[in-house]
Image (cartoon, helix red, strand yellow):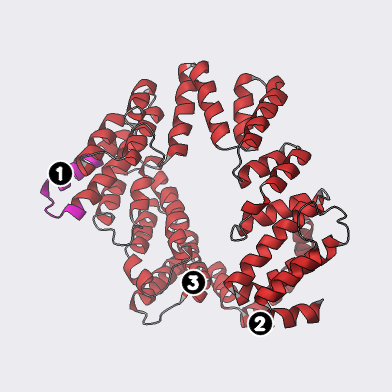
Amino acid sequence: MESNRKQKLVDLGPDALADALLSLAVHSDKADDLIERLIVTPKENVHRFKQKLSSLKQSKRFIDWRGAHDFARELEMLLQDLKAGVDDAVTGVELVASFYEADSAIFEMCDDSSGEIGDVFHYNAKELFVDYASRCDDKEKIADIILEINKKDDYAIRNTLIDCAGECLPKPVIRTMIATLQKWVGKEKKEHDKRHHLRSIESLARQIKDAQLFEKTRITSLGKLSTTALIDIAQVCLESGDVETAHSWLKKIPDGETYQAYERDQLLEEIYQEQGDSEKLTELLYQNFRSYHSIDTLQALLDVIGHDKRDDVINDEIRQILKSDRLEELDAEFLIAVGKIDEAENYLLERADQFNGNHYDSLVSLAEAMESERRHLVTSLMYRSLLISILERGYSKAYPHGIRYLKKLDELAVSITDWKECNHHEAFKAQIIEAHGRKRSFWSKYEVKK
């Protein structure tokens, strides 16, 4: 489809396209900027880049969160000017570096709560820097530029260039960078600045797969190692090919520690696979599956023990799920996902008194799934819970949702013949009218929309 449109535009001819672009430029500054970039010389594009960057540094305007998206696109266009105007690798590196050095002016003039401005530095500018740096023969100069820029990083942006050093620099040059940073650490008096340099050393050590240096640096930085640190060290050891050492670091995590348990288990899974320890791997995957029932954890287990055991594993687990009196919405989702609709319905009905309408996302998802299977009673009970939650909180912004739930309850009631021990719809409606009848803004809209 896209290629067809392109061909049609080509068929229009250069004159028609030029007129269209000029017409568009009258109404769009971005289009006007694009035309200018296309028609000027590379040298003029470099001048445009420098001029725009200088204007940004001197600008007194402030861009709130609503203008952040357009401002991010403006910065992207600025980098496009540079890309279009500079072919020399060293010049390109230096100019991208000047963009990073303008971080203070850029972030102080905008509200980047959306993170879009930061993304321009983390992605667009980084990719351009790596492109130029990869083509530059003087790798030591690139290393010096990265280190100089990263001496200060008040906005946690410049470390992006440290983190991508391995993409454009050889190991010997990175080793020299590490030695320089270690000297800086020894000279620093402020703890914050010292940790900043140590963080850079960690990043570079990880990129060259020096697990011992990473470990030593993390210990120097933190002293007593946290669970996060133990996992990070184990990860780097594993990336470096030292499976046994990675395992030994994970063993240092206290028994019963739940913080970052997912990350730890992911590493253990890789370690057991590397070690060929199918027994421990199976035990871990069973444990993960039982603690978090999902198609993904089931699939991971079956990949190891065999997919021929699928029915046995599911049936055994269903028995365990049904033994518990406590409602676990994830378990209900799992029963639905594996096609056990009758079991899911019974599971939910028997625990309906535990429905919590404040759990909006999961309860709506379950209600919709049950409705699609025409299990109208349990669907109604979940929508009742969602409606009651909105009315009890008096959250007027959510009233449109509450009205939709009540209308849904009106529709479902028609097809329910067996209410079991639950109140019929009219009795339920009478109860909520008695409890919340004074919420006139809700009822007036319901009556109008009914």
The label nearer to you, 2 versus 1, is 2
Picture quadrant of residue 21: bottom right
As measured in the structure, the alpha-carbon distance from the residue carrying label 2 to the one carrying label 3 is 42 Å
Can you identify the residue that label 1 sits on?
183
Camera-nearest residue between 400 and 120: 400
Locate residue 414, reporting x and y percent.
Answer: 88, 62
Q: Which mark is residue 11?
A: none
SS of the residue at dot 1? helix
Return the x and y of residue 299 as percentages of the image width and height.
64, 30
Q: Disc 2 to disc 1, how far (Cα)?
A: 72 Å
Residue in the picture at 42% in, 48% down: 130
Which residue occupies 29% across, 58% down?
Answer: 153
Q: Amino acid at mark 2?
A: Arg
Which of disc 1 and disc 2 is earlier in sequence? 1
Confirm whether residue 76 shows in the render. yes
Q: Residues within 10 Å of mark 2 (few under 14, many from 20)?
A: few
Q: Say whether residue 126 is left or right of residue 305.
A: left
Which of the 4 image quarters holds residue 232?
Answer: top left
Range shown magenta:
177-193
Identify the residue at image location x=23%, y=38%. Answer: 219
Viewer-proximal residue among 427 and 29: 427
The residue that label 3 is drawn on is 68
Q: Is residue 188 magenta?
A: yes
| SS for callout 2 | loop
Q: Which residue is mark 2?
A: 438
User: Pointers 2 and 1 in contact (CB under 8 A)?
Assistant: no
Callout in the foreground (2, 3): 2
